[in-house]
C-alpha cells in the first residue's frame, strides 16, 4: 500500500475507534494558537497552519523503519505531511501535492521553524539535514525553540517570538542547521549526488558537445534557484512545479535542442511516461528537439534494474559511470 492508501486506512480506523481522525490539540497546541503565531509574520495560510499541526502529531511515526517509539512529529516526509493534511485533517482521499512543499514547508524552514532531517536506514535514526538529494527518507520536524513558542501562554509567547524572529537570530539558527547537516552528510552515502555530478561533468562534455547545463535538480531547498531561472530564461524555458523535474537539463544554443539526463541509483529512469512528458515540455517551448540519457553508477545497478523492469524508453541513451567511454543507444527489437 502507498502513503495515500495507508492514510485513508488509518483515518477510517481512528474514526471508528476514537470518533475523529485528529484531536483538537496536540500537546495542548491548537490550530488557533498556530494561526495566531504564524499571523505575526504573515505566514498564516491554511496549508502552513495544517502543516505545523501535522508536525505536532504525537502518534506513531509513518516511516516503516522509523526508530522504535518515535512519533510522527519526530520526522515526517513531504508525502506524510501532505497526506496528514489532506486525508486525516480535511477528510479527503488525496494528499497535498508533493511539489507544494515550496508553499507550505519552505516558508517555514526558511526561518528555522521547521528543520530538515533524514531517516538513516542503516542505523534507523533521524539525523540532521537532507543528506541525499531526493531521498525518500528526507523528512521534516518542528524546531524545539519554535515548539516552545507555541507552548507558551498568551502574553509570554509574543515577546519570545519577537526575539526568535529577529534577523540575526534567524541567520544563527539557519547557520547552525546547515553546519549540523553538513556533518551528517559526511557520514552517509551520497551516491546519487555523485552520479548527478558525473553525469554533467563527465558524460555531457564527452557525448553532448555544444550543450550547456541550464538546470540541475540536486537538492532539497529551492527546486529552481534564481541562477537556474536566469539560465532557463536565456534558453527560452520556464520550469514550474507542475513540470517534470529532470536531474539535469541541458540546452544547445546552436541547434536550440534540449537534452535530459536522469541519474539512477534507486529509481527514475527515462521511461515512456517521462520521455512523453518532457517531449511535450520541449514542444511547448518551441524547441527543435530533445534527447534523453539514463545514467547508472555501475553495470551491476543497471543490470539489476533493467533485468527486472526493462523500462528504458526506445530511442534514449544509457551511460554507466564505471564504464564512461561508452554511450549506448536503446533500440527496441
Image (cartoon, rainbow, N blue to C red):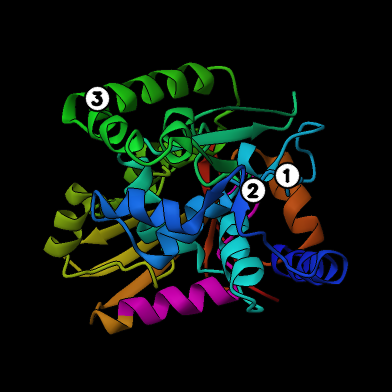
Q: Secondary structure at mark 1?
A: loop
Q: Nearer the viewer, residue 78 or 167?
A: 167
Q: What residue is drawn where x is 46% and y is 33%?
A: 143
Q: Which mark is residue 61?
A: 1
Res. 57 mark: 2
SS at circle 3? helix
How far apart are the two marked residues, 2 and 3, measured between alpha carbons?
A: 27 Å
Quarter holding the C terminus? bottom right
How far across and down, in percent of the image, does residue 60 sit? Answer: 76, 45
Residue bearing mark 3? 169
User: Is the residue under label 3 in contact with that under label 2 (CB below 8 Å)?
Assistant: no
Residue at the (63%, 56%) spot, across then down: 80
Residue shown at 52% from the left, 66% from the top: 316
Would you call the spot at circle 3 few (<14 residues within 10 Å), some (14-19), or many (20 or more)? some
Q: Is residue 243 above or below residue 77?
A: below
Position of 129 relative to 307 (above/below): above
Q: Is residue 27 left or right of residue 309?
A: left
Magenta stretch, residue numbers:
264-282
Q: Position of residue 211 (x, y in %)?
A: 26, 54
- Disc 1 or 3, which lies upstream in sequence? 1
Where residue 1 sits, quadrant-wise, is: bottom right
Q: Residues within 10 Å of mark 1 (few under 14, many from 20)?
A: many
* Left or right, residue 12 beside residue 110: right
| Front-most of residues 25 and 133 | 25
Residue 173 painted magenta: no
**How far apart in space, not on screen, are marks 2 and 1 (Cα)?**
9 Å
Q: Which mark is residue 326?
A: none
Amino acid at each position: 500500500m502507498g502513503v495515500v492508501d495507508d492514510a485513508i486506512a488509518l483515518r477510517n480506523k481512528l474514526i471508528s475507534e476514537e470518533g475523529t481522525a485528529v484531536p483538537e490539540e496536540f500537546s495542548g497546541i491548537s490550530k488557533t494558537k498556530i494561526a495566531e503565531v504564524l499571523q505575526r509574520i504573515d505566514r498564516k495560510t491554511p496549508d502552513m497552519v495544517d502543516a505545523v499541526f501535522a508536525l505536532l502529531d504525537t502518534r506513531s511515526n509513518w516511516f516503516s523503519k522509523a526508530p522504535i517509539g518515535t512519533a510522527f512529529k519526530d520526522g515526517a516526509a513531504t508525502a506524510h505531511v501532505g497526506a496528514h493534511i489532506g486525508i486525516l485533517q480535511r477528510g479527503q482521499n488525496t494528499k497535498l501535492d508533493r511539489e507544494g512543499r515550496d508553499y507550505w514547508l519552505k516558508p517555514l524552514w526558511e526561518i528555522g521553524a521547521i528543520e530538515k532531517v533524514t531517516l538513516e536506514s542503516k542505523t534507523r535514526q533521524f539525523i540532521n539535514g537532507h543528506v541525499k538529494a531526493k531521498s525518500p527518507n528526507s523528512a521534516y520536524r518542528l524546531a524545539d525553540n519554535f515548539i516552545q513558542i507555541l507552548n507558551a501562554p498568551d502574553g509570554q509567547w509574543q515577546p519570545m517570538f519577537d526575539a526568535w524572529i529577529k534577523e540575526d537570530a534567524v541567520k544563527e539558527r539557519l547557520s547552525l542547521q546547515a553546519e549540523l547537516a553538513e556533518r551528517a552528510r559526511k557520514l552517509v552515502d551520497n551516491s546519487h549526488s555523485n552520479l548527478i555530478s558525473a553525469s554533467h561533468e563527465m558524460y555531457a562534455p564527452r557525448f553532448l558537445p555544444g550543450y550547456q547545463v541550464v538546470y540541475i535538480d540536486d537538492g532539497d531547498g529551492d527546486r529552481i534557484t534564481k541562477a537556474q531561472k536566469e539560465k532557463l530564461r536565456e534558453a527560452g524555458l520556464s520550469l514550474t512545479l507542475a513540470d517534470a523535474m529532470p536531474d539535469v537539463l541541458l540546452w544547445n544554443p546552436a541547434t536550440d535542442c534540449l537534452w535530459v539526463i536522469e541519474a539512477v541509483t534507486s529509481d527514475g529512469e527515462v521511461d515512456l511516461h517521462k520521455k512523453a512528458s518532457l517531449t511535450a515540455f520541449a514542444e511547448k517551448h518551441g524547441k527543435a528537439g530533445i534527447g534523453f540519457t539514463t545514467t547508472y553508477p555501475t553495470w551491476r545497478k543497471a543490470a539489476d534494474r533493467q533485468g527486472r523492469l526493462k523500462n528504458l524508453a526506445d530511442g534514449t541513451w544509457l551511460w554507466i559511470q564505471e564504464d564512461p567511454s561508452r554511450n549506448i543507444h536503446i533500440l527496441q527489437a
